[in-house]
Amino acid sequence: MPELPDVTIYVEALQQRIVGQTLIRLRLASPFLLRTVEPAPFQLEGEKVIDVRHVGKRIVIALEDELFIVIHLMIAGRFRWLPAGAKVPAKLGLAAFDFPNGTLLLTEAGSKRRASLHIVHGEDAVRALDPGGVEVLETDLETFKELLTRERHTLKRALTDPHLFSGIGNTYSDEILHRARLSPVQMTTSLSDEEIARLFDATRSTLIDWTERLREEAAGNFPEKVTAFRKGMAVHGRYNQPCPDCGSCASQTALSGSRISAQAGKPANRPAGGRRYSSSTITLGVATATVPYSGQRFLNRSTKSVACSRVTPLMANRNRTSLNSVTSGRTG
């Protein structure tokens, strides 16, 4: 799923190409894409684009007469910039936005259609689509701390919750936690002030660094290779590869639709707290163990993550209710 650095580069590329241009036509190729009835797509024709911005992971195209196109790419949605009037691909194509200087093509890989397009009128309607998470690059440490510790969740879940923090998903949360030297399943309420400050700094620096890196890669061209797995990432997508800092390998496995990563042979400790748990088998490298887990409290979202095993000792004797020495997160 494109996250804040990817969305930022998309927004910048679109600003350069379509702001000031008139939308000639919107061609919808998938009946599942459009999630609104009014205004109708034909009402956008002839309207000039006045701005492009993002609201979390959503891209907002503002037109005259207070009309807005709000696009959520979800996991596999991507943009392509093609010559004017380009054909919509039969299998991947969802929609085409025709402008005098080119066509913005929206595609989605795979058989599931998760990407969405809303056509709305007025800023209030745009705000209604905003999950409400704060922009981490625009907030301060105290606000970050208050949101992070408001409820008891794993760090992975808190960072990827769009109601708390905007634009962070599975990919960059892995990188953030690696840089912060914190375990993805450490609980938000068990952090010291120093750890919160470290996480805050790591969140900001990771997002800024990767935005700059992607901007340099694009070099003014339209971003074509938007992916969750990039060369130079410390842990995400580096299953069974050595950590660039310590050299130890990370491993991952599936647990009831979720991905768990840990150092090979590390035990997974039993969560406590008197709650109801169901059991599944976790494979930790070459070792296996059956452990109970709370699907509601710990792994109630589809997740996958790879983390350096060196963060797992931080959990020892720190958090009785987490799956110690195990890392998890949801799909970005």
Image: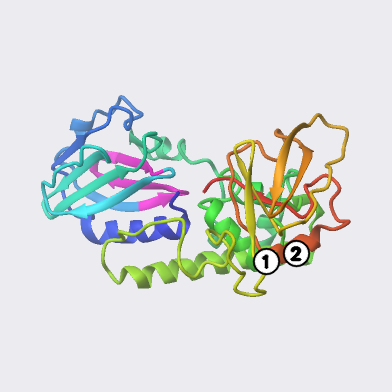
Point 31% across, 47% down: residue:
61
- Total of numbered circles in the picture? 2
In the rendered structure, which amino acid carries the disc numbered 2? Glu
Residue 74's quadrant in the figure? Answer: top left
Task: Name the residue rendered at 63%, 68% in the picture.
Answer: 179
Q: Nearer the viewer, residue 106 or 199?
A: 106
Examine the rendered structure and indicate whether residue 61 appears above or below residue 179: above
Of residue 143 and residue 152, the one placed in the foreground of this image is 152
Q: Position of residue 51 (x, y in %)?
A: 30, 52
Decide whether the magenta segment is chiefly helix, strand or loop.
strand
Say if the magenta span includes residue 60.
Answer: yes
Residue 224 coordinates in the image, percent (x, y): 30, 59
At 28% from the left edge and 27% from the top edge, which residue is drawn? 31
The answer to whether residue 276 is magenta is no
Residue that sits furthest to the front in the current view: 286
Whether residue 192 is visible to the viewer of this picture, yes or no, is no
Residue 87 pos. (x, y %): 14, 43
- Residue 241 vs 291, above or below: the answer is below
Horizontal placement of 5 versus 91: left or right? right
Q: Does residue 55 appear to the left or right of 323 in the view shown? A: left
Tag 2 secondary structure: helix
Horizontal side, residue 166 vs residue 261: left or right: left
User: Dividing the picture into quarters, in which one does residue 302 lie?
Assistant: top right
User: Label 2 belongs to which residue?
Assistant: 195
Q: What's drawn in magenta, residue-wise? A: 53-73
Badge 1 is on which residue?
A: 180
Of the numbered discs 1 and 2, the one sitting upstream in the chain is: 1
Q: Is residue 327 above or below residue 106?
A: below
Spatial CA distance of label 1 from label 2 is 8 Å
The reply to whether dot 1 and dot 2 touch (C-beta < 8 Å) is: yes
User: Quick check: 253 left or right of 49?
Assistant: right
Residue at 54 percent of width and 58 percent of height: 172
